[in-house]
Image: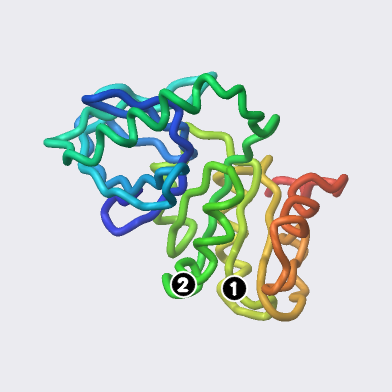
Amino acid sequence: MLLGGELAVCRTRDVSEVGVSLDTAAWFPLGTRLAISLVDPSSGTALEVIGDVVREAAAPTWSIGILLVEPPAEWSAIVASAARQSTTGLPTSTKRYRVLVVGDEHRQRGAMALYVTSGWDVLFATDGASVAEAIENVDLDAVIAELDGEDPRVTPIMEDMRTLQPRARRIVRGHGRGSSDLVHRFVERDSGLEALLDAITADIPAASSP
């Protein structure tokens, strides 16, 4: 999902002939126009649609409703596939984490496949302050900086996140280990989801608020 150049990974809650409901870590006001790319699990093909937010996210579900603008003919196949899946009883994850990924655009896109397959609600941003408004009404489970450990941007980003989301686990995924005590866990860039999940769930004492 795309908003003003920013990316967010969401999970599709429901689809219909005229709209779609998404679970997302991002917050969008009524009337926001979004470009949404959905993958048909039956065929593996992606379809992009445009829609307007007609229902804002609210606790406890944090799902948004989107009215599609002239959905393409292929949309009917997505709806039919979803209807078939709803009767299969496929298991779903018991915990969907809400995660903010911060870093350079090229690093974000390089890690996109990893986060798309996570099943988490993921919001991407180039710096912490730029998403302050978007996340002020959402409690994040983690903030992941896609930067190397000694990158000088790590400290200001994590300082912002400690203020904006004091309960979120602060993680750096990159080469090397920095010395900032603002970071709960450093994870190597080549590590997969298991290492990130461990970093999010590990019993690490939370850093004190400023």
Residue at horizontal 25 percent and vertical 43 percent from the top: 34
The answer to which image quadrant residue 172 occupies is bottom right
Using the image, determine if residue 139 lies above or below residue 115: above
Q: Which mark is residue 147?
A: 1
Q: Which mark is residue 104?
A: 2
Cα distance in 3D space between marks 2 and 1: 8 Å
Q: Which mark is residue 99?
A: none
Name the residue type under label 2: Asp
Q: Secondary structure at mark 1?
A: loop
Horizontal and vertical percent for residue 142? 64, 48
Name the residue type under label 1: Leu
- Determine whether, in the image, residue 128 is placed left or right of residue 51: right
Residue at horizontal 50 percent and vertical 22 percent from the top: 86
Using the image, determine if residue 169 lies above or below residue 16: below
Using the image, determine if residue 190 lies above or below residue 165: below
Horizontal and vertical percent for residue 167? 68, 40
